Image (cartoon, rainbow, N blue to C red):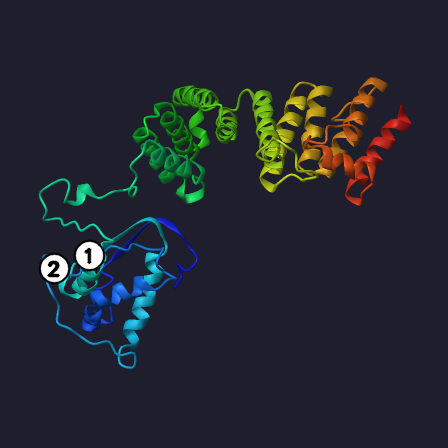
Amino acid sequence: QESKGLEFDDVLLYNFFSDSPAEDLWRAVSSYSGEDIAAYYADATVAASGVQKFDWESPLLTETRHLDFSSDQHKILETELKMLYTAITRARVNIFIAETDTESSRPMFNYFQRRCVVDVVSKDNNSEEEGLSGVRVFGAMNTVEDWRNRGEYYLRSAEGERQVGCLRLAAKCFDKAGEPKRRDYALAFLSFTEIEEQDPAKLRGKHGVELKEKLYSITEQLLEARDVGFLNKAALCLLRTGEQEEYTSQLFELYARLCYTQRICDEEGNAILPLAQSVHEKKYFSYAAKLFAKCSEQRGVKFDLALDAFRNFVCADMYDDAAELITSGALPIQDNTSFQKLYQLCIAASPMDPTSSFRKDFKQRADKCQCIITAVKQVASRL
């Protein structure tokens, strides 16, 4: 019941029938005949769907004692069938059914085999094709394109708790597709996720030097992919070194801008405007802003770096932080030239630029933008 609404690539049912409270009531499944399935597929509403092959008279199956189904007497079986349906429909690729009691599971196993929807394996089989080692991990995929598409799917799905597993599967799929570079990029991403889980204190000493070298190598490999999906990973990897922070902030901003541009453009390259930044884009704009501000402070308050920080703060919709740069002097505006650069950023930008939504707020004097408007006015009056 807790799994309803969830989906997984693989689902394992262990002793579902062996431990079922329905016990030998599963024998009622044997009352479903070849005529029943033929009549089912004759229905026009289902004629074009499902697996429509079946082998009801297979001589390889061991028959079970017949039991007629009764809706009044077999309520527990109805409940168990609903649970079985829920479990099976959670799987995107494979469902594995393992049973220790062959008698309890035989009625449903016979049914599945007659419907030709399962591959049967046994630990007792000696041949590699028929034994456990012959089980397909990825489902039925026959073409290079199938393997490539599945690899890209796992790569897109590599988030949260599933990240490591998805990356390993992506690498295997790309290997099957004959794309070693794509495989290596997935493995580089995997190496980074494993490093990310390590204690930052390990970046010190001899081990730290080796780890930094590995981080730089992974960053280089991810950048070589020329894939927007790897750009933020490369930036995060470089950030982990604690070095090259200005370059890292540029990577964060570039990634956020590319994501924004991809999202606002249709397949023909036409812009769909106006469109505000997504939560994901704002997150990386904020990373860039904070790093630019840090670099500026470390170098004795540099105007260009501080202006980069301001630009990214407004893209991240962090107007208070942007205004604080001005009022605190972290964005040093000491003459008309520097003021004009700031003012032009506030009023002039391409409609496709991520700052366009901020520019609209600034021109319309939106309430949330008043902190920046006030800060700019104070600087203007001082000059």
- Which residue was labeled with disc 1? 113
Location of the C terminus by quadrant is top right
Q: Amino acid at mark 1?
A: Gln
- Which residue was labeled with disc 2? 61
Q: At numbered mark 2, what does the secondary structure look like: helix, strand or loop?
A: loop
- Farthest bottom residue? 72
Q: Are marks 1 and 2 in contact (CB under 8 Å)?
A: yes
Whether residue 84 can be seen here: no
Quarter of the image holding residue 251?
top right
- Label 1: few (<14), some (14–19) or many (≥20) C-alpha neighbours in 10 Å: some
Q: Is residue 3 left or right of residue 247?
A: left
Q: How far from the left and from the top, in percent, is residue 28?
A: 21, 72
Whether residue 348 can be seen here: yes
- Number of marks in the image? 2
Q: How far from the left and from the top, in percent, is residue 144?
A: 33, 31
Can you say whether 176 is above or below 46 in the image? above
Write the residue at 31% across / 29% down. 175
Q: Is residue 281 left or right of residue 93?
A: right
Can you say whether 367 is above or below 41 in the image? above
Write the residue at 27% across / 72% down. 77
Can you say whether 329 is above or below 134 in the image? above
Q: How far from the left and from the top, in percent, is residue 382?
A: 89, 26
Marked residue nearer the N-terminal end (1 or 2): 2
Location of the N terminus by quadrant is bottom left
User: Foreground residue, 171 or 382?
Assistant: 171
